[in-house]
Image (tube, rainbow, N blue to C red):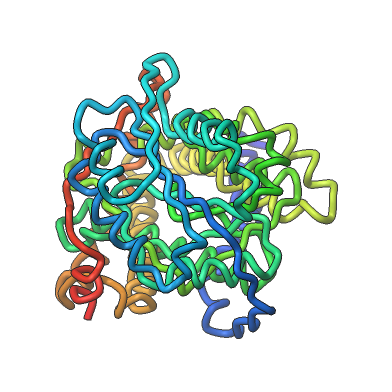
Amino acid sequence: MEQIEVLNLVSRGLFVLLGACFFYQIIYLFAPVILRVSPHGPVKQNRYAVLIAARNEEAVLPYLLESIRAQDYPRELVTVYVVADNCTDRTADVAAANGAIVYRRFDRGHVGKGYALDYLLQRIEAAGTLDEYDAFLIFDADNLLCPDYITNINRVCSDGYDAFCGFRNSKNYAKNWLSAGSALWYLHDSVHLNASRMLLGNMCAVTGTGFGFTRDLLARCGGWKFFTLTEDIEFNSFCAANGVRIGFARDAMVYDEQPETLRQSWRQRERWVQGGIQVSLRYSGRLLRGLGRRQTAWACFETLTLGLWGALLGVLSFGVSLAWVLAANGIRGALPVLAIGLVQTYGSLFAVGLLTTVSCWKYIGASAAQKIGYCFTFPLFLFTYLPIALGALVRKRQWKPIEHCVAVPVGAMRRSAE
């Protein structure tokens, strides 16, 4: 058999395998339109501890704390804790002035949100109050909660889920193509991926902020011991491998701030890629073993395909296909094929962005022209992941904070989307 024929067969085989690994994503796109949401069971009045890790966030933190005080959930059942992590500003004073219980942490050797949350939970336990809470909610200092956030999260918690997350929206969607690209991806993650997982009975996924877990799950984890650059992905991987049920509360909306400059966006996503590689290597064995158990099989499969191994399969498939095209057509003949592939990829991503925009139209704080226009730049935003991923492979792994400056009340978010 000639080399070209071998490459052709391998290319086709990898393409089929890649399709088999990701075909469910198409089902996820349309499941919310076809399936009905199951009603919630009896609601319990759970007691919550809100955990906020803040580093030099005096500008935005008061608005988050204000949105927590404005919740329609019984105030006596919600206690707010803030860890002022290596702060050099007035974050701790601002938090205390807004009614939070504050702990100051200074540790330059262990940097990152995971370490800060672990420290905060240890302080709560040392104070003898950890067992007073049924569940814990984690937010970033730049977040804003809609008034019924905790009420809606509590419905999912009362349904017996070990962990739970809300609908992630953006405070600064309309700023530029970078903030819109990141925000649109999170909307897609909420309205298609997590919503569909919930409808189909699959494990949902937390995305960095606006999520929670029960005290029983915290004990099962041995405390908050997720210290990689992407502690949320690590938490998801732990849950997948151990059969932990993560539920999604579609009506629990949380707003956060997206990077507005290429430098910030690049640095953030480079950290995500590096952290994703860390987690994939660390949890591969446990996830592979989980494929053999009925309770964890699908969650482990999805976690593997959405991590390093799914990305490597995609790169391998593209590489072999490119080699086959070059061998069969030469460089000049390969250019039109590559151009067609690029256009098809752009079109597919544009369709995802457009479908997400239409599905979330009333939630997006932007003009109609901006909503449509950013559908066209959404694929370009995702294309930038390629150089970011390449840079992440050679740059030193380190956690760096992202500066937040969009200081607005939650009411402004709700008005901007009307």
Q: Position of residue 86 (x, y in %)?
A: 32, 25
Q: Position of residue 59 (x, y in %)?
A: 18, 45
Residue 390 occupies quadrant: top left
Q: Give the left or right position of residue 101, taking residue 3 as reference.
A: left
Q: Give the left or right position of residue 379, taking residue 125 as reference.
A: left
Answer above or below: position of 361 versus 334.
below
Q: Residue at x 72, y 56 (%)?
A: 298
Q: Position of residue 80 (x, y in %)?
A: 42, 50
Residue projecting furthest to the top: 109
Q: Residue at x 54, y 56 (%)?
A: 48
Q: Residue at x 25, y 59 (%)?
A: 180
**Viewer-closest of 402 and 316:** 402
Q: Quadrant of the C terminus?
A: bottom left
Q: Residue at x 84, y 55 (%)?
A: 294
**Viewer-closest of 415 and 185:** 415
Answer above or below: position of 75 versus 8.
below
**Is residue 379 shown to the viewer in this render?**
no
**Viewer-closest of 322 and 5:** 322
**Viewer-closest of 344 and 262:** 262
